[in-house]
Image (cartoon, rainbow, N blue to C red):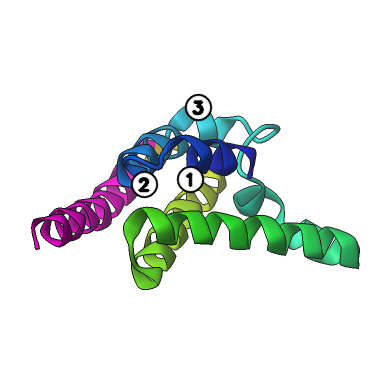
């Protein structure tokens, strides 16, 4: 959540580029292996929802803020949902496996995410040209 706020505050010129940079760091082996500092959505959603109503509200707030930022950066709610779901799902899956599949999962996810980022970039460029 803090990283998303940081990006949102500093990415008004090109939110797509800031999101790409964020995802390049998010979809890494280092992030997957660092469970203590990683994404709370990928690491703690189920626990937060079971813990208390306050924890559930905090998790929902963070998830909604993250989705809002992705929507702003990509220019489409549908693209934001696809991208965020792909990134979070890839991290969860990569954390679940105990073999060489981790890098393959992350690389495959980033390629899919890149398609969304590239489509959003083309759409912003076309909108500016009009």
The mark lying in front, picked from 3 and 1, is 3
Q: Residue at x 44, y 56 (%)?
A: 70
In the rendered structure, the answer to whether residue 63 lies left or right of residue 105 reads: right
User: In which quarter of the view is residue 83 placed?
Assistant: bottom left
119 falls in the magenta region: yes
Q: Residue at x 40, y 63 (%)?
A: 80
**Of residues 48 and 72, the one drawn nearer to the viewer in this rendering:** 72
Relative to residue 4, is residue 46 depicted above or below?
Answer: below
The residue pinned by badge 1 equals 94
Residue 116 position within the rendered picture, expressed as x and y whole percent measured from the top left: 26, 57
Q: Which circle's residue, 3 or 1, is located before the other in the chain? A: 3
User: In which quarter of the view is residue 62 placed?
Assistant: bottom right
Q: Is residue 98 visible?
A: no
Residue 128 position within the rendered picture, expressed as x and y whole percent measured from the top left: 15, 55
Q: Which residues are magenta?
A: 103-130
Q: Farthest residue in the top direction?
A: 30
């Amino acid at each position: 959540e803090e990283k998303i706020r940081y990006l949102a505050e500093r990415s008004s010129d090109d939110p797509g580029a800031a999101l790409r940079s964020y995802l390049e760091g998010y979809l890494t082996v280092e992030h997957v292996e660092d469970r203590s500092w990683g994404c709370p959505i990928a690491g703690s959603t189920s626990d937060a929802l079971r813990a208390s109503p306050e924890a559930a509200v905090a998790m929902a707030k963070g998830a909604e803020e993250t989705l809002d930022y992705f929507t702003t950066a990509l220019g489409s709610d549908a693209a934001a949902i696809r991208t965020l779901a792909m990134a979070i799902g890839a991290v969860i899956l990569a954390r679940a496996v105990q073999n060489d599949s981790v890098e393959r999962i992350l690389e495959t996810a980033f390629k899919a995410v890149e398609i969304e980022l590239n489509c959003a970039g083309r759409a912003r460029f076309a909108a500016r040209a009009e």
